[in-house]
Image: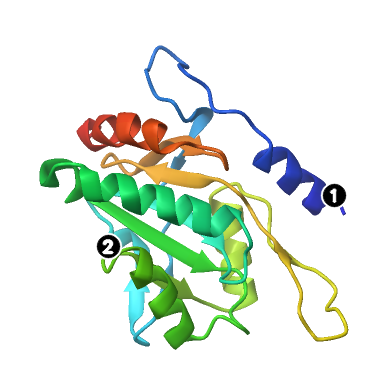
Amino acid sequence: MLALAALLIVAGCGVSAESGGRAYRGVMLARAIPRPDFTLTDTHGQPFDFRAKTDDTVTLLLFGYLNCPDVCPVHMTNIATVLHGLPYDVSGHVRVVFVTTDPERDTPAKLDKWVTDFDPSFIGLRGTPDDVKRIEAAVNVAPAVAGVPDSSGAYEVGHAAQVIAFTRDDSAHVVYPFGTRQADWAHDLPLLVRVK
């Protein structure tokens, strides 16, 4: 219950206009999060070394699941829409990595279709629940919690609602909570790409 309460607090955070002297519209972190070093499996069954394969990029990392009714599709739609409208010298330096918190239902084929429907460059990753919990802990987000299945076997998964933005200096200085608007992404992504 405490983990679910923490998730609700994260999901309800507002988006700051400016913080720490920087003009980011995301939420500035008090302490930067180092780019984590982990390997999960991509939707083609290949190992994906996060640190190596996202080196020298702005990497937007988010956790979620395909049956998510709001947070995941809204974040993915907003990010994809903005990236499609930005010049390549910005969009070409941005990677989006989605880690499923529901690998039992989110098969590789389903995950691949879901992420690539937003943008063919988006990456979907799967791992064991323990693998995902270790990564969540490494990036300071609450662990995902599966709800109780209903009579049909359906269930929801409480998960972190923010997108973590790792810049090209291998750290995350800002996160984007649920409710971040396309205008905020369009403002911040060019700024994030300039951080080295």
* Residue name at image x 56 percent, y 38 percent: 179
For label 2, the residue is 52
Residue 80 percent coordinates (x, y) = 34, 53
Taking the image as shown, residue 135 lies to the left or right of residue 194, namely right
Q: Amino acid at mark 2?
A: Ala
Quadrant where the N terminus lies? bottom right
* Residue name at image x 43 percent, y 87 percent: 109
- Say whether disc 1 or disc 2 marks the residue closer to the N-terminus: 1
Q: Element under label 2? A: helix
Q: Element under label 1? A: helix
Observer-nearest of 163 and 32: 163
* Residue name at image x 59 percent, y 63 percent: 134
Q: Tell me the crowding category of disc 1: few under 14, some 14 to 19, or many 20 or more residues within 10 angstroms, Cα based.
A: few
Residue 65 percent coordinates (x, y) = 58, 68
Q: Amino acid at mark 1?
A: Leu
Residue 144's tag is none
* On screen, residue 89 above or below 23: below
- Quadrant location of residue 63? bottom right
**Mark 1, mark 2: which one is toward the viewer?**
1
* On screen, residue 174 above or below 165: above
* Residue name at image x 11 percent, y 43 percent: 89
Residue 19 percent coordinates (x, y) = 47, 17
Mark 1–mark 2 distance (CA, rounded to whole Å): 34 Å
Residues at circles 1 and 2 in contact by the CB criterion of under 8 Å: no
Q: Is residue 59 visible?
A: no
Q: How is the image coloured?
A: rainbow
Residue 2's tag is 1
Q: Tell me the crowding category of disc 2: few under 14, some 14 to 19, or many 20 or more residues within 10 angstroms, Cα based.
A: few
